Image (cartoon, rainbow, N blue to C red):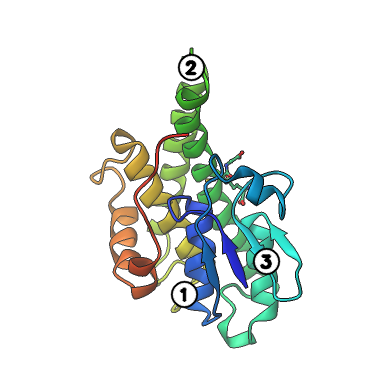
Amino acid sequence: MILIGQYDSPFVRRVGIALTEMGMPFEHRPWSVWGDAEKIAAYNPLRRVPTLLLDDGMALIESGAILDALDEMAPPERALLPRAGAARRDGLRVVALATGTADKAVSLLYEPLHHDHPSERWMARCRTQIAEGLHALEDDRARRATGWWLGGTLSHADIAVACMLRFVREAHPPLFDEARYPRLAAHATRCEARPSFVAIGQPIVNKL
Ligand SMILES: N[C@@H](CCC(=O)N[C@@H](CS)C(=O)NCC(=O)O)C(=O)O
């Protein structure tokens, strides 16, 4: 398999970490969505990352769809979400809160990069959405006594939240006050200490 995209993207990083945690070997092509857009377009007409090329030549896009396929391809004991039922829905809800927050953090980073006159109204909305996403995740984690988000083992929920947190903290430092989100800060510390998180990551490249 070949994973296309740079690890400063919380979505690409999430897929790279999940592949590593699942023990699935892959090659990495750190192509930029700006400088390498036409190379990416050969596999994904949307010119977005992550894009994952499977061994049979199929190109998967959208991190959620990619990880769903990988969970299905992995031996059941290595999948990072339950296959069905309430526990799966719970995990998907946490993942959606995390990736939705990451989406808004990416939009907030892009706005001044792509507009001569960035919209303050749009950026204020993004900041509110990021803060509310972080609050909801902090409250959700407070209601759980388990070591990892969904129980005793690492899941897609843990990875999605941690990748979002690293991106928000690096791209928008004023938006993450550790004192306000102590459980999320502890979650990030725990995840970032794992070898897969250490190996897969890069500082944000904030230019076109
Ligand atoms: N919903 C997508 C979001 C992916 C995403 O936002 N990727 C960004 C990089 S962080 C990208 O491709 N940006 C270029 C663009 O959207 O044109 C997913 O989960 O895969």
| Left or right, 187 with reference to 36 | left
Query: Real-space Cα distance between discs 3 and 1?
Result: 31 Å
Q: Neighbour class for label 1 at 10 Å: few (<14), some, many (≥20)? A: few
Query: Real-space Cα distance between discs 2 and 3?
Result: 35 Å
Q: Is residue 44 above or below residue 198?
A: above
Q: Amino acid at mark 2?
A: Pro
Among the two numbered marks 3 and 1 on one chain, the one whose residue lies closer to the N terminus: 3
Query: Mark 3: which secondary structure?
Result: strand
Q: Amino acid at mark 3?
A: Leu
Q: Is residue 165 above or below residue 26?
A: above
Residue at 52% over, 24% down:
114
Along the line of sight, the residue nearer the viewer: 148 or 65: 65
Q: Neighbour class for label 2 at 10 Å: few (<14), some, many (≥20)? A: some
Q: Position of residue 11 (x, y in %)?
A: 53, 54
| Left or right, 145 with reference to 75 | left
Residue at 48% over, 17% down:
118
Q: Position of residue 87 (x, y in %)?
A: 61, 70
Q: Which residue is mark 2?
A: 118
Q: Disc 2 vs disc 3: which is toward the camera? A: 3
Asked where in the image residue 37 lies, by quadrant, the reply is top right
| The quarter of the picture showing ligand 1 | top right
Q: Disc 3 vs disc 1: which is toward the camera? A: 3
Along the line of sight, the residue nearer the viewer: 157 or 15: 15
The reply to whether residue 83 is visible in this rendering is: no
Q: Position of residue 186 (x, y in %)?
A: 28, 60
Q: Amino acid at mark 1?
A: Gly
Q: Which mark is residue 53?
A: 3
